[in-house]
Image (tube, rainbow, N blue to C red):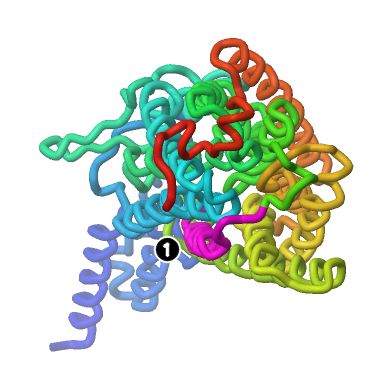
Amino acid sequence: MCPDLKRLGFALCVSLLCHLGAPALAQAQDQSDRPPVSVLSAELASSSASAAELKPARTEQAAVPPAAPPVSAVPAPTSPQRVPFAQISAGDTAWMITASALVLLMSLPGLALFYAGMVRKKNILSTLAQTFAVCALVTVLWVVCGYSLAFMPGAPWLGSLDAAMLDSVFYDKAAGLVSVHHLATTVPESVFVMFQLTFAIITPALIAGAFAERMRFSALLLFMGLWLLLVYVPVAHWVWEPSGWLAQLGVLDFAGGTVVHINAGVSGLACAWMLGRRIGFGQEPLMPANLGYTMMGASLLWVGWMGFNGGSACAADGRAGMAMLATQIGAAAATLAWMVAEWAVRGTPTLLGLCSGAVAGLVAITPASGYVDPKSAALIGLLAGFACYWGATGLKRLLGAADSLDVFGVHGVGGVVGALLTGVLASPAIGGVSGSLATQAIGVAATLAYSGFVTLGILAVVNALVGLRVSRQQEIEGLDLSQHGERVE
């Protein structure tokens, strides 16, 4: 074959390829910085004079299609919605179910044993019964309207009744749909409801330690029901629901320093003031019945707190792991701090002091657990141990409150310390936000004021309806017999 024919054939092939591939190549050119292939093909064709005379290569560029409009980001949901099963994370769901069980374990039997060991023998059963009854009462009220008012979007002060009787909770196996809450979009709403229920149970149950050994059982039930709906639910909405006014302000409370501990602590102080001191206080030793119970209860609280704080990430992820680690470090540091303070002041460390120090650290690290690194967790625990020891001793005397089991001294003071330090030590790398001491102080002050005053009002109503305190003879006899007709032999 002659050279001219070879060059002619080559040029024709190149021209045909350019004709067929120009549109696609032009589109590729639009997406890269490389020169268009059509130009390269033209240069190859022009290198052969004979081929260029017979049929020049196609060099015009195909029209570039208009760019597609940018896809707008899907707005984050602001209320519960139904999603396909595929959106649910098995890992997140498994962890949240486990965390819910751990937090329930904190109340039953953790808190029940913790308090029962610190009262006198004649009041052990009544103390256990109080926690047990609160668990049942709060569960029913949570289903009726508590969950909806706390976690449904609504006004800045309170949610709506859109999810009353858990009307938003949905599961349809045939349709492959399940409801999720907008704060936890990878777990079924039923799991989120259960997790938040365990917080609603333990918070009012904590208050019972402040009036241990002297409140009527009927008064306790009425007070706890009203307190849940009028105090806990609004404060939970303020802080945790995105439409709440403290949430809008930027108050940080990862797992309940404000909602649970400051709330319960100041309410316990109000109860102690209203009910007065136990008979014999300051005149005879009111010795704990069995500190072994208290130690077992504190241990269950410590273990359960891993779900309390770690579960508040609402996911099985690195932040949940950091929250658990911070929880352990904070509790350990506070235990040692309380031990050192007690040893220095009283000359000997006690088991009760060790247990109280651990709880103080767990309380203080709660609002910060999802925002701080291990070093900050240790600092929070250390400061909380010393502060809560003072709260249960010196501050208690200054206030003149007969807070039987130091609810305010540990939960109130520890909650305040943790909430304020969260504003100072929060790490944007961990929590994605920076803290503000001033904003945290607003959250603390608002909770102290609202919870304290409303609790006093509830106590006044309950006292008018059924009477708050048992009679002198019933208190001397013990609440086990006078309120429940049974006793520990």
Could you tell me which residue is drawn at 78 percent across and 39 percent down? 439
- Taking the magenta stretch, the answer to whether it contains residue 290 is yes
The three-letter amino acid code for the residue at tag 1 is: Pro
Q: State how many labels appear.
A: 1
Q: Nearer the viewer, residue 401 or 440?
A: 401
For the point 45% across and 35% down, the residue is 134
Foreground: 204 or 144?
A: 204
Identify which residue, 244 or 481, lies in the foreground: 481
225 vs 104: above or below: above
- Dominant SS of magenta comes to helix
At x 62%, y 16%, the residue is: 463
Q: Residue at x 47, y 66 (%)?
A: 35
Foreground residue among 459 and 366: 459
Q: Position of residue 469 (x, y in %)?
A: 61, 25
Find the residue positioned furthest to the left: 174
Task: Give above or below for 446 relative to 131.
Answer: above
Residue 394 belongs to magenta span: no
Query: Within the image, what quadrant is residue 208 found in?
Result: top right
Judge whether residue 416 can be spotted in this image.
yes
Residue beneath disc 1 = 36
Secondary structure under badge 1? loop
**Residue 68 in view of the camera:** no
Relative horizontal placement of residue 183, taking residue 4 as reference (left or right)? right
Q: Which residues are magenta?
A: 287-308
Estimate the x, y position of residue 328 in percent, counting from the top left.
Answer: 59, 68
